[in-house]
Image: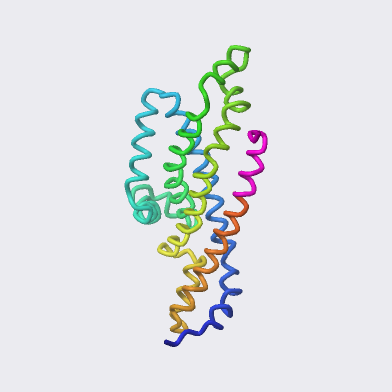
Amino acid sequence: MNIDIGYVFEIIPELLTYLPITLYMTFAAMAIATVIGAVIAIILVNKTPIFMQLAKVYISFFRGTPILVQLLMIYFGLPQIFPIFNDVGAIVSAIVAFGLNTSAYLAEIFRAGLTSVDKGQEEAAISVGMTYFQSLRSIVLPQAIRNALPATGNMFIGLIKNSSLAFTIGVTELLAQGKMLASANMKFFEAYLAVGLIYWVLTLLYSQLQSWYEHRISKPYQV
């Protein structure tokens, strides 16, 4: 067995120079997913005609097909149908694909969070003169966010790891650079171990941050 552990730590600084690309794709995709997921969740909760059926088809498609297929469809397929997408870069395509895929899962998470709040609270708010959106913003959403946060955090962690698929369409991020270093030095185990360690540390740091935030927002509900 010939494993060069020193090489693992030697290439980590070089790999970290590509970390901003991974984080940029992750945060941008999460922002898109959160907005779309929230809109779809509100549609599902209110059972808006027509839009509800479209939302269900949307969720079914993006949850029922592999994310890699969706990524390839958006990057290679859309320009074939709409030539204007030829000018869209690989990073933007990856962000859109990851955002759309994650939004389908977040929609169900947010829907569950919204329905977990007692309907009587919303009705009481409206009865004292608040509009639906005022009651949603001031009463329902704070509780729904607290209930949906653990599952949403898990989706974010999954998104961090799924961002590695962007290398399949030519985005040079953590995994892509690790693959190039592995091929150049024929030290595949060491290079991929270094990449894995970086992803592992990222998820550990985020998990700690999420645990701290969950504890903070739960204080008002603790007896």
Instruction: For residue 79, say whether it is visible.
Output: no
Q: Is residue 79 magenta?
A: no
> Which one is in front, 177 or 132?
132
- Image quarter (top left, top right, bottom left or bottom right) of the C terminus: top right
Colour option used: rainbow
* Vertical position of residue 171 compared to residue 190: above or below: above
Left/right placement of residue 101 relative to residue 61 reads right
Residue depicted at x 53% and y 64%? 200
Residue 149 found in image quarter: top right
* Vertical position of residue 108 compared to residue 81: above or below: above
What is the span of residues highlighted in magenta in the rendered image?
211-223
Residue depicted at x 57% and y 54%? 207
> Which one is in front, 169 or 101?
101
Residue 127 found in image quarter: top right
Q: Position of residue 193 (x, y in %)?
A: 48, 73
- Image quarter (top left, top right, bottom left or bottom right) of the N terminus: bottom left
Q: Position of residue 41 (x, y in %)?
A: 46, 33
Instruction: For residue 85, say whether it is visible.
Output: yes
Majority secondary structure of magenta residues: helix
Q: Does the magenta stretch include residue 216?
A: yes
Q: Where is residue 95 in the image (x, y as percent from the top left)?
A: 49, 52
Left/right placement of residue 145 relative to residue 81 reads right
> Which one is in front, 125 or 101?
125
* Vertical position of residue 28 compared to residue 117: above or below: below
